[in-house]
């Protein structure tokens, strides 16, 4: 009898794990379908010593919806793309820890919002943190405080966690804060033709390493092979940004100011700019490089790095020596950015960086 009970419990745990995996796969597949239907989908990922994070940000506007609705019934109040998102989130809500939905259609104005905690903390993944307890020093003895601190532990500050901080500052209200109290959550907002959805998943990094240095040698090997084609032009580049210089948008395309805050944005980068004029070759090279970067993040869990990508743009970077960063406050990084322009031309920027990242506005030239 005892053996039967143990077997049943094992089966239940296995089925629960399968359900969780299916849920995550369903979310990823749905995001890909939204991208195929014209929504702008940006994926941000991070590997850190303590945790691994993934975030999808989906944006669509009236123009996107207009293209989608060209052959649909014009009397439809809510666009079909929005309707499909609502149906999908309703289905996800049936298996969630906590969910909120608000919908209003008054005075010719449409508003729909969702907040869903898909996975929380605890042995059953069903506990959502109370951020008031987590953020208040007076509640430092609570479990919520400890779990929230543990979630915010990182080896070094990077773009992924900087964005999470901005989200925390922007979002207010209990149903919105729930996003930061869960390990997996979704927020969706649709107001009069514009929509935005954010999906976040974090989990503990169970791979144990020693230094967590970023080593993109395998990526560079593929880059060298793909750019050896006769249709690829190469240009050496050297960017320098002095301490305290302006980072205004007129001259700066991409920058950071958090790896070495005491150096106030000081940066020196050396590397190569690759340019591919052929749209067909550009698309093929871009996809191979992106898939290599995704594979690197998937498999090299003892390397701290981050990857942000969409259908036509990605940034892939990491700190080469975490000890020198943390002990000597010297930031040495490897950085690659690829972008397909509206004309189909692919630009790839591969840099070795000392200090913060700084890319000038006219980097493609």
Image: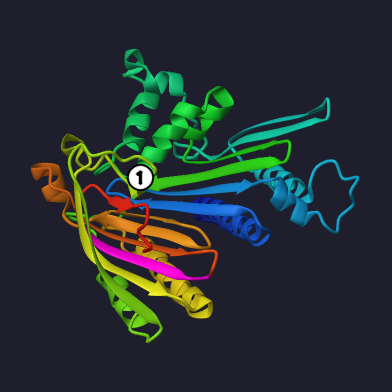
Taking 79 as reference, is 301 left or right? left
Establish if 155 lies above or below 271: above
User: To which quarter of the image does residue 72 belong?
Assistant: bottom right
The residue nearer to you, when weighing 355 against 116, is 355
The residue nearer to you, when weighing 236 against 96, is 236
Establish if 280 lies above or below 105: below
Q: Is residue 215 visible?
A: no
Q: Is residue 229 visible?
A: yes
- Residue farthest to the top, as pictured: 138
Question: What residue is rendered at 55% in x and 64% in y?
Answer: 342
Taking 59 as reference, is 135 left or right? left
Question: What quarter of the picture does the C terminus occupy?
Answer: bottom left
Q: Position of residue 170 (x, y in %)?
A: 49, 28
User: To which quarter of the image does residue 349 belong?
Assistant: bottom left
The residue nearer to you, when weighing 51 against 113, is 113
Q: Is residue 31 magenta?
A: no
Q: Position of residue 104 (x, y in %)?
A: 77, 28
Q: Position of residue 167 (x, y in %)?
A: 46, 34
Establish if 283 lies above or below 61: below
- Residue farthest to the bottom, as pictured: 230
Question: What residue is rendered at 34% in x and 72% in y?
Answer: 274
Taking 180 as reference, is 64 left or right? right
Question: What residue is rendered at 50% in x and 44% in y?
Answer: 200
- Give neighbour class at mark 1: few <14, some 14-19, many 20+ (Cα, 10 Å): some
Q: Position of residue 45 (x, y in %)?
A: 41, 52
What is the count of numbered marks?
1
In the rendered structure, which segment of residues is drawn in magenta?
Answer: 344-353
Q: Which residue is mark 1?
A: 159
**Chosen colour scheme:** rainbow
Q: Is residue 352 magenta?
A: yes
Question: What residue is rendered at 45% in x and 36% in y?
Answer: 121
SS of the residue under disc 1: helix
């Amino acid at each position: 009898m005892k053996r039967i009970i143990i077997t049943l419990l094992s089966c239940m745990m296995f089925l629960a794990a399968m359900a969780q995996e299916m849920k995550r796969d369903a979310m990823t597949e749905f995001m890909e379908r939204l991208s195929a239907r014209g929504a702008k989908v940006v994926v941000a990922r991070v590997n850190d010593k303590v945790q691994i994070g993934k975030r999808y940000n989906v944006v669509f506007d009236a123009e996107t919806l207009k293209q989608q609705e060209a052959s649909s019934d014009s009397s439809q109040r809510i666009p079909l793309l929005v309707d499909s998102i609502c149906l999908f989130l309703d289905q996800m809500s049936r298996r969630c820890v906590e969910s909120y939905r608000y919908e209003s259609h008054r005075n010719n104005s449409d508003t729909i919002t969702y907040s869903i905690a898909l996975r929380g903390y605890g042995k059953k993944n069903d506990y959502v943190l109370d951020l008031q307890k987590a953020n208040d020093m007076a509640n430092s003895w609570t479990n919520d405080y400890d779990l929230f601190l543990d979630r915010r532990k990182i080896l070094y500050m990077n773009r992924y966690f900087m964005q999470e901080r901005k989200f925390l500052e922007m979002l207010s209200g209990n149903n919105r804060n729930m996003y930061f109290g869960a390990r997996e959550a979704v927020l969706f907002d649709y107001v009069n033709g514009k929509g935005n959805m954010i999906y976040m998943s974090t989990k503990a990094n169970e791979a144990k390493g020693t230094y967590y240095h970023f080593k993109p040698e395998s990526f560079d090997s593929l880059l060298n092979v793909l750019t050896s084609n006769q249709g690829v032009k190469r240009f050496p580049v050297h960017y320098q940004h002095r301490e305290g210089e302006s980072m205004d948008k007129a001259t700066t395309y991409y920058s950071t100011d958090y790896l070495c805050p005491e150096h106030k944005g000081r940066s020196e980068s050396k590397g190569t700019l690759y340019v591919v004029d052929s749209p067909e070759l550009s698309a093929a090279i871009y996809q191979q490089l992106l898939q290599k970067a995704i594979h690197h993040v998937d498999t090299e869990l003892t390397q701290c790095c981050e990857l942000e990508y969409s259908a036509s743009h990605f940034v892939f970077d990491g700190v080469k020596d975490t000890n020198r960063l943390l002990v000597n406050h010297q930031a040495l990084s490897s950085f690659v950015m690829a972008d397909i322009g509206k004309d189909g031309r692919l630009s790839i920027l591969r840099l070795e960086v000392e200090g913060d990242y700084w890319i000038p506005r006219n980097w493609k030239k």
